[in-house]
Amino acid sequence: MIKDSSLDEVKKLFQHISIASFIKYFEVFEEHFDSRDNTLIFDSFNKNKEYESWTDKSYKSRATKGKTIFRKKLEIVALEYITQFANKNRLTDETIGKANRLLKNRQNSIVEIEPNILEQIKKIENSTELSNSEKTALVKIRLGQSNYRKKLIEYWGKSCVTNLEIQELLIASHIKPFSECNENEKYDLYNGLLLTPNYDKLFDKFLISFDNYGKILISSSLKKSDLEKLGVSKYDKLNSEKISKSHFEYLKYHNEQFNLKEKTFYNTVYN
C-alpha cells in the first residue's frame, strides 16, 4: 500500500517531469541518479531531439526531478501511482505498458514476509523499551525465521563472501540497516547479503564494507592479528556472479557509514 506522504511527494515531482518523460528515460535516470552532472542525461534527451519542444529549463527540471525519484527510492511508488491512479487518457499505450513491466520487475525483487512475522517485527520497531542495537538483533532473529532469509539463500546459494554452504550458519544481513529503510527497502532482495556470523557482525558494525568492485574494505581499527583470528582476508570479495548494480546502490550507503566510522577512528587516534 502506498503511503500518503510518499504519494504526495511523487505527485509534486510529476508536476516538474511528465509521466511520459519519466517512463521514457527511466533507465537513464536510474543509471545517473547519483551524479551531479546532467551531461549524459542531456545527451539522451538530445538523441530524441527533445530540444525541438523543450527549453533549457525543461531539460534541467526533468533531469533533476527524475534523479530525485531514484535518489529518494520512490521509483516503485512512482510506478504504482502511474499504473493505479494516473489519468490513462493522457498516456500512450506504450507508456502504460512500459510502466507495468517496470513495476512488475521491481515488485519481483520485494520479498513478502509472513503476516505473523511482520507483526512481530513492527512491535519490535515500535518498542520504547529496547535500544536500537537490541531492536536490530531481534529483527534479525525474526527475519531469520522468515521468507526473507529463504529468498537470500535461493539467490546466493552460499555465503556471498566465504562460499560456506552450511545454511544453518548463514545470516541474512541487511546492507542498508533495517532501521534506516523505507518499506520497500526493508524486504528488497538486493538489500541483503548472506554472511557467516563473523562477517555479519563486522558488517553490521561498519568495521568492514565492500567497494564498487565488491572488494572488501577493512577498518583501520582492526589489527592483523584480529583479522587472522576472525578468518577475514584483505583479498575477500563478494561473489561476482551474483552481485549486481542493485546491490551496489545499497552498498553506497554502507560505504558512507563505513568511511564516517573510519574518520571518527582517525580523529580519536591522531588528534
Image (cartoon, grey):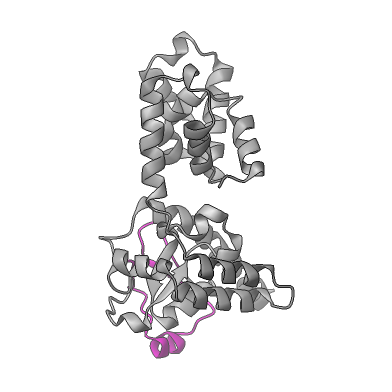
Image position, residue 139 (x, y; %): 55, 73
Image position, residue 246 (x, y; %): 40, 52
Task: Give the overall secondary structure of the magenta segment.
Answer: loop
Q: Is residue 236 in the magenta section?
A: yes
| Numbered range of the magenta stretch | 209-238
Answer with left or right where residue 118 lies relative to residue 52. right
Q: In terms of image quadrants, where is residue 69?
A: top right
Q: In terms of image quadrants, where is residue 85?
A: top right
Q: Is residue 35 visible?
A: no
Q: Quadrant of the C terminus?
A: bottom right
Q: Residue shown at 47%/66% (left/top)?
A: 114
Q: Is residue 268 in the magenta section?
A: no
Q: Residue shown at 45%/35% (left/top)?
A: 29
Q: Residue shown at 61%/72% (left/top)?
A: 266
143 or 173: nearer the viewer = 143
Q: Residue shown at 67%/76% (left/top)?
A: 268
Q: Is residue 49 visible?
A: yes
Identify whether 124 is placed above or below 63.
below
Image position, residue 199 (x, y; %): 43, 78
Q: Residue furthest right?
A: 128
147 or 235: nearer the viewer = 147
230 or 69: nearer the viewer = 69
